[in-house]
Image: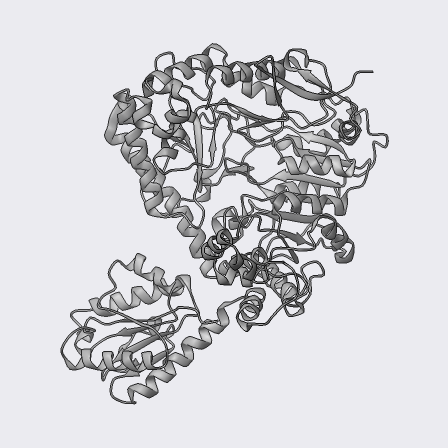
Amino acid sequence: MKFKFPIIIIDEDYRAENSSGLGIRVLAESIEKEDFEVIGVTSYVDLSSFVQQQSRASAFILAIDDEEFIEDNPKALESLGKFVEEIRYRNDEIPIFLHGETRTSRHIPNKILKELNGFIHMYEDTPEFVAKYIVREAKTYLESLAPPFFRALTHYASDGSYSWHCPGHSGGVAFLKSPVGQMFHQFFGENMLRADVCNAVEELGQLLDHTGPVEASEKNAARIYKADHCYFVTNGTSTSNKMVWNSTVAPGDIVVVDRNCHKSVLHAIIMTGAIPIFLMPTRNHFGIIGPIPKQEFSWDRIKEKINNNPFIEDKDAKPRVLTITQSTYDGILYNVEEIKEMLDGKISALHFDEAWLPHASFHDFYGDYHAIGADRPRCSESLIFSTQSTHKMLAGLSQASQILVQDALNTSLDKELFNESYLMHSSTSPQYSIIASCDVAAAMMEEPGGNALVEESIMEALDFRRAMRKVDQEWGDGWWFQLWGPDDLSEEGIEERAAWMLNKNEKWHGFGNLATNFNMLDPIKATSITPGLNVDGEFDEKLGIPAVIVTKYLAEHGVIVEKTGLYSFFIMFTIGITKGRWNTLVAALQQFKDDYDKNQPIWKVLPEFSQKFPIYEGVGLKDLSDKIHKIFTQNDIAKLTTEMYLSDMIPAMKPANAFAKMAHKEIQRVPIDELEGRITAVLLTPYPPGIPLLIPGERFNKIIVDYLKFARTFNEKFPGFETDNHGLIKNYIDGKLTYYVDCVIDD
């Protein structure tokens, strides 16, 4: 398949009517005759933005004339050197040629020379010969780009072979037989549909057996991520987590789990029949989940919890797995090396759910605050697992995930046994485009490109924070929006890691007495705080703007955020974030403030929302904010939502046994008012933050029931702003909406 990667020529005389301009244009024409596109420009323009062209180019030709070597005017060489340096910072493979007149390598600084692929002298060889030389190097470079599986897939898709295997659309042909199918085909395109194949295509290898190009790609990714093993997963990190658990945990096994875990881990507890010991994280009144205190990881504390659990018969049994959410949704990280020191050998496998942290491997900023990295010491006994969503922070398609494994000094992964768990949760018809995106997402992070991409993400995030601080300073007392994070922020560049540490009893985080150097905040995760609530859970009596109002406003102005809390919303600076995107957000927040101050009617500022919910049509933006703020204040909702997660969760049954009651229909749908003391058969998960309140087998306490009563009242009063609680069943009885939870039938 032919890809579009032009050769870029930078020459100030490219369009000039002189000998230099004529010479470079003749060369460009000769290159085009070799079936390569040429783009000619006359200057480096904005250096940083133009360097981005390295991702679109197959080669660079940089022209420099004799007169530009004037000793008292070094600007030309300086610009050339800076450009080459910036290119090589991102890409050390793309061919770079220098095109000159009579001057030689004697006149070029060595720091430039060593980065060049060639030095072309005008009029020495024919343009046709030089063009062939340049094109050969460009082709060699392009052929080296594609990682193993993606290369094999593109070759297969371009072969034009008739196939008799599924899927039934046969490379998209079936869609062409229907009008709506035609629309589908035109939207997704020939290549995607031709690449949608099944595992009968032997030349692409087998995902389930890890053979051929798939195996080569997984090994390549393991090398890039500094892991011993890598497994691509095509149905998300939810499935990756279950694969890890099914490979290590059996019924009745003890497991140690972050209470702030993804619900897939709780599903794994149910599926494996494990007995969980939970480590409790901190929380602040903004609703931000903090770190698990370091003392919770101590073996004495874990043993105490094991001894107190009524369902564990063998109190001396070794826990099979520890699962930690690394990073939390809001970006809090743990020092992995300290966790390894505390628990190596005491727990068989240390599993870090790094769905939100695959980028950390590629920048020194993150140090020991991620699971597996270069030159990191191995555990003596415990295997290290990292499950990562390459579709969240990197460039994978949705559902692209991977499992990384690091062997211990005395324990190695049994690949055959692990693959049995892998097969249990894998489709026998995986989506090959997702496999290819796993392959490409890893290849994109190859040094030095990966480091540059992550550094750009960090820089964009810091520049956003600086821009928000500038708005705050210039606006004065009337500005509300603040970014959650350390108080000090440098004016330029990337700060030292120490600036992002969570130190004990710091006011900004509100998590209390934390251990030194145990936790840090990932700067690319940005939580914006709206006015009305402080970190102590105290409401402002005069001003309150619940975040749900702000995020609905932003959505109708083309800005979609990742997560909305009570008085906070969350955005992420992935490798795909641009200056235009975060600058638009800064501008939109200022527009919101202007509309709020004018109390603009909802029909004007939220037209789509007001059409859907006409009861708000004539209400002002400020008035609506005041109404929701008032009900939050009256119910002291900040402290309620904090305390419900920190309250005692009393296990009454093993999770698997409680879930089995639901499967056997031995349950009762219990209304909210009758829930206290009942045993839940389902996960109860408020969104946000998407962290389960209760898991099957635990009893409802008063504070959780109080929260559900509040949610019911709030949903009735403010349609369109409903709180979403998975596990809460809605039924209409006599025209009235009633809420239930499936509970185990009382004996």
Q: Find residue 214 and report its image quarter.
A: bottom right
Residue 595's place in the image compared with 245, above or below, is: above
What percent of the width, then of the height, locates residue 198?
Answer: 65, 61
Residue 38's place in the image compared with 82, above or below, is: below
Q: Nearer the viewer, residue 543 or 38?
A: 38
Residue at (51, 28) in percent of width and height: 288
Determine whether, in the image, residue 49 is placed left or right of residue 228. Answer: left
Q: Find residue 78 and report its image quarter.
A: bottom left
Residue at (75, 30) in percent of width and height: 659
Q: Residue furthest left?
A: 17
Whether residue 544 appears in this view of the structure is: no
Whether residue 598 appears in this view of the structure is: yes
Q: Residue furthest right?
A: 313
Q: Find residue 654 and report its image quarter.
A: top right
Determine whether, in the image, residue 450 is placed left or right of residue 67. Answer: right
Residue 94's place in the image compared with 695, above or below, is: below
Looking at the image, how many numbered discs can be counted on the residues?
0
What percent of the width, then of the height, locates residue 182?
Answer: 48, 56
Residue at (74, 32) in percent of width and height: 276
